[in-house]
Image (spheres, grey):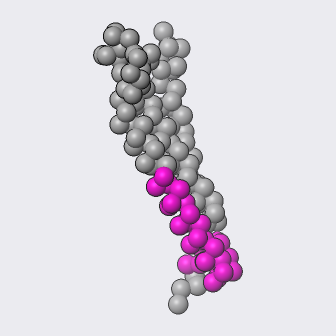
Amino acid sequence: MNGDIIAINFPFIVVALLLALGFYTIGFKRNLIKVVIGVEILEGAVNLFLIALGYVKGGYAPIYTLAPKKAVGNMVLPTPQALTLTSIVIGVAVSALMLAFAVNIYRHYGTLDVTKIRRLRG
């Protein structure tokens, strides 16, 4: 019984671990590239959460036209999958923007250390 509960909640446990790792990386790492990696880990956790919410055991895709008649009540909602696809596309653009900022900061200041960049205000 206890093993079944863990198996059912396993994706959500992984999401919680990824969220903790992402927040730790953003909060405690001082290198901008590591901060970008932390943001990417958070993005992956959110995407996994969305997909885990939309999972239906034995469900059929709603675009599958030859699904059996018993599948009408067992269709998978396409909304979480569409949101995840949109999130991936937006995440790629945000990642490219953050890395471009990191490159420009490195060219301007000669470092990627957040504490040194804060001291160089002027």
Residue 116, horizontal then vertical, whole percent: 62, 77
Rendered view: 77 above or below 68: below
Residue 54: which quarter of the image?
A: top left
Any part of residue 16 in sight: no
Q: Image point 56% across, 72% down: which residue? A: 101
Rendered view: 89 above or below 121: above
Q: Image point 37% across, 33% down: which residue? A: 78
> Is residue 25 highlighted in magenta?
no
Residue most extreme to the right:
110
Q: Nearer the viewer, residue 8 or 120?
A: 8
Rendered view: 65 above or below 35: above
- 107 vs 73, left or right, is right
- 36 vs 59, left or right, is right
Any part of residue 91 in sight: yes
Residue most extreme to the bottom:
122
Q: Which residues are magenta?
A: 89-118
Residue most extreme to the left:
73
Q: Image point 30% across, 16% down: which residue? A: 73
Q: Image point 44% across, 49% down: which residue? A: 87
Q: Nearer the viewer, residue 46 or 22?
A: 46
Rendered view: 27 above or below 43: below
Query: Majority secondary structure of the magenta segment?
Result: helix
> Is residue 114 highlighted in magenta?
yes
Residue 117, horizontal then vertical, whole percent: 59, 78
Residue 71, horizontal then vertical, whole percent: 36, 14
